[in-house]
């Protein structure tokens, strides 16, 4: 997965990496990189960007880990875009979680 710019956020990979590294809420995920546990999600780095990788049966996902300063904007973009259909909060969050890992 190559990140050039996150549409709607006006942020490139360098800024994303910096925000992920400076986000204290993501510290534990950085510490879990390359420490896989059986049946648990893995945390990996690709091109300096932190991702969550997990498998659940046939479902395999690699999710971009969203820094706290961008979480609200990511969810807002998913809800407010023309293609979203203005779904409810739970459906919007489920849709966002297909591509992004947002810690609460």
Image (cartoon, rainbow, N blue to C red):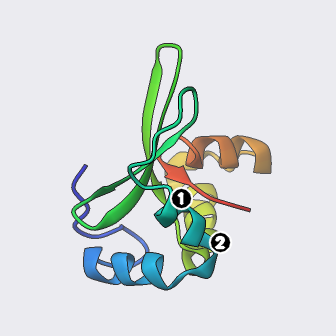
Work out how far the residue at label 2 is from the one at label 1, CA to CA, in angstroms.
14 Å
**How far across and down, in percent of the image, does residue 102 sit?**
62, 58
For label 1, the SS is loop
Q: Residue 17's mark? A: none
Query: For mark 2, what is the residue?
Result: 72
Q: Which mark is residue 81?
A: 1
Disc 2 crowd rating (10 Å Cα; few below 14, some 14-19, many 20+) is: few
The reply, left or right, for residue 19 in relation to residue 15 is: right
Q: Is residue 89 left or right of residue 46?
A: right
Taking depth in this image into account, of 56 and 70 the one nearest to the observer is 56
Q: Name above or below for residue 10 compared with residue 37.
A: below
Q: Is residue 84 left or right of residue 44?
A: right
User: Which numbered disc, 2 or 1, marks the residue closer to the eye?
Assistant: 2
Q: How many marks?
A: 2
Quarter of the picture holding the C terminus: bottom right
Please tell me in which quadrant of the rendered image residue 61 appears: top left
Please report the residue visible at 44 percent of the width from the left and 79 percent of the height from the top: 21
Where, by quadrant of the figure, is residue 51 drawn? bottom left
Q: Residue furthest top?
A: 58
- Across and down, in percent, residue 68 comes to 61, 76
Q: Position of residue 73 (x, y in %)?
A: 58, 73
Residue at coordinates 34% horizontally, 83% vertically from top-left? 15
Above or below residue 89? Residue 36 is: above
The one of 85 and 64 positioned closer to us in this rendering:
64
Q: Earlier in the sequence, mark 2 or mark 1?
A: 2
Mark 2 secondary-structure assignment: helix
Q: Horizontal and vertical percent for residue 33?
A: 42, 55
Q: At x 56% / y 53%, what residue is drawn? A: 101
Classify 10 Å Cα crowding around label 1: few (below 14), some (14-19), many (20 and above): few
Residue drawn 35% across the image and 67% down it: 6
């Amino acid at each position: 997965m190559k990140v050039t710019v996150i549409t709607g956020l006006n942020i490139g990979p360098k800024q994303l990496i910096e925000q992920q590294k400076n986000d204290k809420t993501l510290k534990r995920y950085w510490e879990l990189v390359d420490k896989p546990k059986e049946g648990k999600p893995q945390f990996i780095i690709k091109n300096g960007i932190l991702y969550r990788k997990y498998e659940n049966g046939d479902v395999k996902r690699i999710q971009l880990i969203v820094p706290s300063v961008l979480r609200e904007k990511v969810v807002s973009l998913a809800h407010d875009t023309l293609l979203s259909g203005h779904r409810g909060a739970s459906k919007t969050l489920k849709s966002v979680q297909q591509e992004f890992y947002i810690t609460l």
